[in-house]
Image (spheres, rainbow, N blue to C red):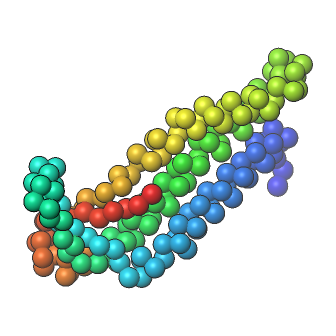
Amino acid sequence: MNLSRGKRTTLTRLVPFAAVASAGALNVFLMRGEEIRKGIDVFPSVSRAQKSDMAKEGKDNESLGKSKKAATIAVAETALSRVLNATPIMVLPPLILVRLQKTEWLRRRPRMVLPVNLGLILTTSVFALPLALAAFPTRQQIRAGSLEREIVEKVGEDGLVEFNRGI
C-alpha cells in the first residue's frame, strides 16, 4: 500500500492501541466466559428508599434467578468499557507527540520527548479513566422483557430488574 511517510508514522503509532484494545476485550470474554454460559444473578429493581428499608430490617434483595442474556450484556459492556478506557490514553498522546515532534522547540530538545510523552499520558489518564468507568454503570437496570422467560414470569414483561455488570 502506498502511504505517505506521515500517514505511515501515524498508523505505526496506533498499532499498540489496536493490540491493547483487542487484548483487553478478548481477556474480558475469556475470563468471564463462564458467566455467559451459566448466567448471572438478576435482582428486582428497588429504589434507594426501599434498599435503605431492607438494610434496616437486615434483608437482602433476593435473586430472581440466573440470566445468560444479562451476562452477555454485562460482559459485552465491560469489554467495550475496556476499549473506551484504552482509547484516549493510547491514541491521543501518540498523535499529539507526532505533531509536537515537528515543532522547533522539541527538535532542539530531543531529551524532552520522554517527559512530554509521559505528561501527555498522565493528563489523558486523569481525565479518561473516570469517563471510561462511568460509561456503563456497575449496577445495570434493564426491562425484564429482554431477558429469559423465567425472569419475565416473576416480574412481568415491563418489570425492571438489575444485575451487577462488573468492572
Q: Is residue 37 left or right of residue 103?
A: left
Q: Is residue 154 left or right of residue 67?
A: left
Q: Is residue 65 left or right of residue 32?
A: left
Q: Is residue 28 left or right of residue 134?
A: right
Residue 19, position in %: x, y?
69, 58
Residue 16, position in %: x, y?
72, 52
Q: Residue at x 66, y 56 (%)?
A: 20
Does residue 71 lie above or below 2 as drawn? Answer: below
Would you say residue 17 is visible in this rendering?
A: yes
Does residue 30 lie above or below 165 as drawn? Answer: below
Residue situated in front as seen by the camera: 151 or 139:
139
- For residue 161, what is the image quadrant? bottom left
Residue situated in front as seen by the camera: 128 or 99:
128
Does residue 53 lie above or below 101 as drawn? Answer: below
Q: Residue at x 33, y 70 (%)?
A: 70
Q: Residue at x 46, y 41 (%)?
A: 131
Would you say residue 47 is visible in this rendering?
A: no
Residue 68, position in %: x, y?
34, 77
Give the tally of numbered discs: 0
Residue situated in front as seen by the camera: 120 or 103:
120
Does residue 159 lie above or below 153 as drawn? Answer: above
Q: Residue at x 10, y 59 (%)?
A: 57
Residue situated in front as seen by the camera: 11 or 167:
167
Quarter of the image with the C terminus in it? bottom left
